[in-house]
Amino acid sequence: MLRFLLGRLVQAIPTLLGTSVVVFMLVHLTGDPALLMLSPDTPAAQVEEFRQRLGFDDPLPVQYGRFLAGIVTGNLGDSFRFRAPALDLVLQRLPATLQLAGLSILFASLIGIPMGVLSAMSRGTWIDTLARGAFFLGQGIPPFWLGLVLMVVFSINLGILPSSGRGTVAHLVMPVATLTVYLTASLARLTRGGMIQSLKEDFVRTARAKGLAPRTVLFK
């Protein structure tokens, strides 16, 4: 087991390095950080001094090495927009992120797993066809688009849910619903596929041959 985990970890290193390169290049594609952080009327001499002080004038490989070292040590630098340590900003928003993720996973599990099981048990019927259509639709709708639609309908047009903020159950409804739709569809499809494979196993066929009810076979 330990060898398997170590092998997976080694395989993940190239992916992590590739991701870090992409993130690093995307940050630099936005333009000169010094010009983004300073006002447009800042004298050129001050801009150059600022660039040198933060190391923006170093070669890209040197900046990338510093970027990797910062990730490893937890020093993510300062946010260009908020002018504050990036790690502090992440930690401030982490509770809300975990809350949304946790609730979305909970609701997706409560809805998606039973739907996947029902679809597998009803394979080839109209129930299965309807369920698979719902799975396809749920995975096909981009979450950001669904979120915008919910905001327009329930916040702007109907005015019954807040479009921003945090602190009440009403603030959780739209973001949790947005995340839950995709997660539910994905989990239901995985559950359906796994159930179909399980239903083909010899022990399931043996149980059915002995006359056990489908519900009994399912829970056993």
Image: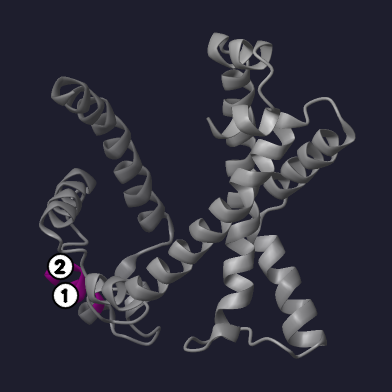
Q: CA distance from mark 1 to mark 2?
A: 5 Å
Q: Main secondary structure of the magenta part?
A: helix
Where's the N terminus, which quadrant? top left
Q: Closer to the camera, 204 or 113?
A: 204
- Residue 66 image position (x, y, % from top left): 14, 53
> Quick one: SS at disc 2?
helix
Residue 33's quadrant in the figure?
bottom left
Residue wearing tag 1: 49
- Residue 109 image position (x, y, % from top left): 54, 51
Residue 136 vertical position relative to residue 111 in the rendered view, above or below: above
Q: Is residue 78 visible?
A: no
Mark 2, residues whose alpha carbon is within 10 Å: few (<14), some, or many (≥20)?
few
- Residue 207 image position (x, y, % from top left): 60, 16
Q: Closer to the camera, 204 or 106?
A: 204
**Residue 114 falls inside the magenta stretch:** no
| Residue name at image x 23 percent, y 32 percent | 13
Residue wearing tag 2: 52
